[in-house]
Structure formats: structure tokens, C-alpha cells
Amino acid sequence: MALLQISEPGMSAAPHQHRLAVGIDLGTTNSLVATVKSGMSVVLSDDNGHDLLPSVVRYYADKAPQVGHILHDAQNTIISVKRFMGRGLQDIADVGHLPYRFVDAPGMVQIKTVAGVKSPVEVSAEILKTLKLRAEKSLGGELVGAVITVPAYFDDAQRQATKDAAKLAGLNVLRLLNEPTAAAVAYGLDNASEGIFAIYDLGGGTFDVSILHLTKGVFEVLSTNGDSALGGDDFDRRVFCWMLEQGKLPPLSPEDNSLLLTKAREAKEWLTEHNEARITCVTSSGDILDATLTVAQFRELTQPLVAKTLAPLKKALRDAKLTPDEIQGVVMVGGATRMPHIKQAVAEFFGRAPLTNLDPDKVVALGAAIQANVLAGNRSENDLLLLDVVPLSLGLEMMGGLAEKVIPRNSTLPIARAQEFTTYKDGQTAMSIHVVQGERELVADCRSLARFELRGIPPMAAGAARILVTFQVDADGLLSVSAREETTGVEANIVVKPSYGLAEGQIADMLQASFTYAGEDKDLRARLELEVEAKQLIEAVSNALQQDGEQLLNATEHVDIVNKIADLQNAMGDAAKLKSATAALNHATEEFAARRMDQSVQKALTGHNLSEIEI
Amino acid sequence: MNLQQTHFELFGLPSIFALDTKKLDQQFRLLQSEIHPDRFAAAADSERRLSLQYATQANEAYQTLKNPLTRARYLLQLKGIDTQEESNTAMPVDFLMQQMEWREALEEATETANMTSLEALKLQLRDAEKTLQATLTSALDTDSDDTVATESVRKLRFIDRAQQEVDQALEALES
């Protein structure tokens, strides 16, 4: 085993050292952290040897929150918080069954606890912090960054909320990675597979299906579909409702509700390997429930849920223009896929037994760790490339409340599309732009992502202005929108956020609050962050100079960049100077970057001999 | 690589309709392997920005060339020809008749919730699509007959939409 390299906190490792990076599966029920050690992807366990960290956060009035294996206090213990990420109160179907005191905040719901009102982003950040600590303790150093997985069918608001939570936990997000894609990576590399694969990912609260084409280390997602509000939790709830009927129980207290839900989950898990489950419990009011649930009854209760997963499967195949028999392998992901009747339904649909040789609870984290290792710059021999897609169409509101699609679903990332619009009134000087996501025709049926205004359009006749609205979705699946009036050059830009994500100021406030808690100085922290960023930049540019400086730069250009590196080095310790020197170095390397990129392109298309290209 | 290159040039492929799509797939993957933002996660801002821009362009080019309809439209566009798919609805009578038959078949199958007829209609549309693609190959690659090519693109566009409608109808019946 390789010796671990320990570096000074905040110091970046030398170019050829192994950089510590992790993959995190932030799950509805459980979360995990994994890393690549000596070429193998492994899940990191806690001091007690537990791999899975229950995604449970308990708040206290007088001490810091606790995460994981803890006794519940229903109102102050948040479970399955992932279901609330980027969601408003009206989005949560079963509010009545949940023990929490919800606060309907604009954009995202919040929860009142003994430790104050908490946003789902803050609750998720607690889980991420725990995993970050676990990883740093286990690996003996600071993390360069993390790949965090999200359901493929998460929309922009849910992705943004996840990224915000990571930021709040002090993690540098290398990439948001779709869970089924992560699973495909773990499977594909493990089995050296080639061909077309379907990933069926039923987690605690979300369902995803992705169709991927694997070839020579390239994982190309052809289509994805799913339901971000369907998961193993729903099976528990069906059993829970059955229990209420069987026991003819009176309205329950929040504690009793959680007790019964736990019993329901235990019964579900028991039935994976047994023919019947006996459920007994005594409520706080003294009511007794003693019932036996058979496998047949359980299947009948939950069959509609299983059927509900088949519709997205069909849609994904249709979008990929494939039939079930063209799929070479079906991978099952998520703890809920342990249920035999789910395996059976999937096997019947595809006419082949699904692959289950990797632990369905761990496969996502294992795949994320492999991607994190590559992104952190630890190139491995089996270099891989992931080409993922936009899960839901992105569009704009048109006159009459209709949604006009600008980027269709299943477009490969990154993608940019521009569309031209015009004014409809004489002398119109502003235009409001409403960005939506979804497949339906009416704006009211789609999710609202952001509204912004392009102002300062000079008065013209109706239809004379030419307003170009550009959508750019980056490799994380996050959208930014810009609008520009072509005849005058008036511009407006927005990183899609306000409607459902948190505004930048809110994140800053939360960070501030958490620093106060930790007794840290915000300015110091900000400066340290700038220093880390500057060191990374210096390292990146130095590496580039070493590789291509001689060939691609003339003497003057070379000296200029070297000087700017020195300036940045001298700026350490001064936040204002760091900012300007970083910007200067970035600016000075633009032309160099372009030449390097051209060189890569040439290499890609001409540098390979025919035998390499031939498949 | 620059923004003036055509999509064909970007992948080092000939500007023809009968494109070797396997070769296109390979070139696309090779290119993305070098320029994708994942390759620049630890790079300077300037390189990350360029990589995003290039990878976006490569995706756009690949999508355009992969799909026969958009590929044909793009070839005509390179010749300075607007296919006028929205404005020009004039079609030969036999194609109009064919369109009506398909429409009726779609409506009837939707009303009677007949999945089998929907699937059959899908196959019919796929056949028509293949025939048009053959027409496009000769019109664009050998005869240089832009009139036939433009008309074929408009027909193909109609078929493309009809296929989407059949898919939507199937989807509605399934859920």
C-alpha cells in the first residue's frame, strides 16, 4: 500500500503527488464517501466500521447538530431531507404525514427546529460536513475536491441547492455527477464492458433511469428519465398505511408516526428474504398493533409503485430510439432494488436478468470516486470521459403562457442555444424573461427557474428590436442565461438561481453563521480561499508552461507569463492584491490557452494512427 | 479549431449527406476526449472557459451532423439556401394525400387507444424516412439538385414531427 502524503493545511500538493479527492453519494436514506486508493475505488467507513451514514440530522437547543446513527426526536430530527432540496411547500405531497414544522419560505421550504429555522441546504451541509471530516481523517489530509452525485432527473433548482450545500460544508465541488452515470462508471470499469446499458436506479426518494453507450472509456448518456419524487420511502409509506388500517389506530403523535414508519421499513426489508413479516408495536397512547404482512400482500400493496417505474423506462428507451432487446446489460442501483418483485419486473421488461454483482448501496459512491480522481488530476491508465445530458427541457415563457423550448431534454452537455425574440409594443424599453424547465406546453405546468428583465432597450417600433436570449448549460447541468439586444448591445446576464435556489447573499449569511459557531474569522477564511485558488492557478499555469511553453510561446510572451506568476506569488497574504494578480495571470494566459487547445484538437483528430481509430 | 470552421471540417470529414456516421461518432469521441471540461477541471480559468466553449461547439456540430434532417438542412445552409420549413408549406399532391392518410391513422389509433396501429404507423413513417434519405443522398451528393433536396428536407421535417406525435400518443397510452 502506498504511503499517504501529508501536506501542510492549505498547501497544494506538488504536481505529481496524489491529490486527495472523494466521491460523495448524498442519498435520501444513506450517504457515503469513497475514494480511489492505489488504483481501487473504496468506500471510507467511520470509526465504528460503518460505511453508510444515515442521512439523518438531529438538532439540539444547546449543542451542535448530530448526524447519522442517532435516536430520533421526530420534530427536530430531519430524515430524507433530499426530498425537500430546491422544493417549495406546495411541491411536497405528503406534508400532512410528516412530523416537521414547515415554514413556507420563498423558493425553498424551511423547517423549524429547536436550533432555529433550517433550510434543507443547511441540513444537507451537515451530512456533507460529517463525510468530509470522515474522509480527511481517514486520508490524512485536506481534500482537493469532491464529486457529488445527484439524481439524473434533478432539475436546475435541486442541483443548485445541492451545490450550495457543498459550498456551505466547505467542499470544493469538482463536478455534480448524475447517479446512474456514476453507477455505470463503477460497473463499466469493473467489468470492462462495451455496448448499450440501462441503469435502473431506485433510491430512497428518487427514481432514475439512464441509457448509456459505453465504448473505450467513453460513457455517453443517450437519454435519461425518472421521477424525483418516487423511491423506497414510498414503499414504506404503503406498508405504514396498511398498518394504520389493520390496527384501526387513532391519530398518532409525531413520535408514533416515526415509530410506525420505522417498523414499516423493517418489515419491507425483512420481506426481501422471508415470506412474511410480523409487525408489533405499542403506541404512546397504549394502542397495540400486532399484524402479519405476507409477501403476496406486500406485492399487491406496492405493485402500482413498481408499475410507475416502468413508464420512465419506456420513455428513456424511446428517446434513445431503442427497444428493450437492444440493451446489452441492465444495472440495478439503490437499496430499493433489493426487493425481489422489482428485480423480477425489470427482468421481465428487458427479457434478461439484471446485473447485481456490485453492492447497490455503494456503486454510486464508488463511481463518483473514480470521476473525482480523474478530475483532481490523478490521471489513471483507464482514462474515462463522461458525456451526460440535460434531463428536462429548458425554455422560455411566451405570450399566452406557453413554454417555448430552447434546449430539448437529452441534449449532450455542455450545450448552448440562442433564440431571437422581439418586442410586441411600440416604444417598449424592457422585456421580462421567464426561464422554465419541463416538458409540458403550459408555463404553469413547468417549473419556474428564474425571472429577469432586460432593460434599457431604446424605444423602437414593435418587432424592430432583436433580442437574443442565450442559454448555456455547463458540465454540471447548471444553467446560465443571458439576453442581449442586438442592435444596441444592451445586455443582461443571470446565473439561474433566485426563484428556487438560494441567493448569493443567503449563502454568505449562512457561511457567516457557521463561522461564528466555529469561532472563525470570515476575512481570514476568504483570504485563505483566495490563496488556495491562486496556488492552484500557479500550479496549472506552471504545468502548462513546462509542457508547451517552449513550442507555443515566443520569448516575450513567455517572460510576461512568468512575471505574472511571480506577481501572484508575491501577493500571498493580501486579499485585494491576490484578486487583481489572479485576474492578471488569467488574462495573460488566454492566448496561450487557445493555442494549447488547438494543439489538443489537432492531436485528437490527426495524431492517432488508423489502427487506433478503427473499432 | 475555430468558430469559422464548418461542422464537417471540425471533425475532419467530407461535406456530404451520406456521411460515415461511425466515423463521425469516433471523431466526436476523440475530440471530446481532448477538449471536454472534465479534462480541465484543474486548469486555469482561461483554459476552462475555452474548453467549455469548444466542447459546446463540438456537441452542437455532432448533433447537427448525426441527425439526417439537420445534416441535410445544414448542407443546404452552407450553400446559402434557406429551406423555409416554417413559411413554405407547398407540397406535391401525392405527399399531401399521404400526409392526410397518416394524420387519419394517428387520430383513429389515438381515439381507439390502439397501440398496435400506432407501432405500425411508426414503421410506415420510418420507411418513408428512409426513402427520403436515399433521395437526399443523390440530390445532395451526386446530382446537386437543390430544389429536390429542399423539398425533401421539408418532407422529412413533416415526418419527423409526425413521429414525435406518434411517440407522444404512445406515451399518453402507457401512463
Image (spheres, coloured by chain):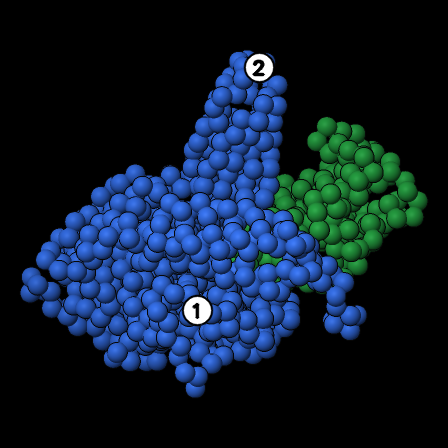
**Does residue A366 show up?**
no
Q: Quadrant of residue B97?
A: top right
User: Mark 2 — residue?
Assistant: A460
Protein chain holding label 1: A
Mark toward the viewer: 2 or 1:
1
- Does A276 sit above or below residue A613? below
Element under label 1? loop
In the picture provided, is A362 more to the left or to the right than B174? Answer: left
Residue A163 place in picture, x, y as percent: 39, 53
Disc on res. A13:
1
Tell me whether marks 2 and 1 sit on the same chain.
Answer: yes
Q: Residue at x 44, y 69 (%)?
A: A13
Image quarter where the C terminus of chain A lies is: bottom right
Q: Amino acid at mark 1?
A: Ala
Q: Position of residue A41 (x, y in %)?
A: 45, 76
Identify the amino acid type marked 2.
Met
Residue A307: percent from left, percent from top: 45, 61
N-terminal label among 2 and 1: 1
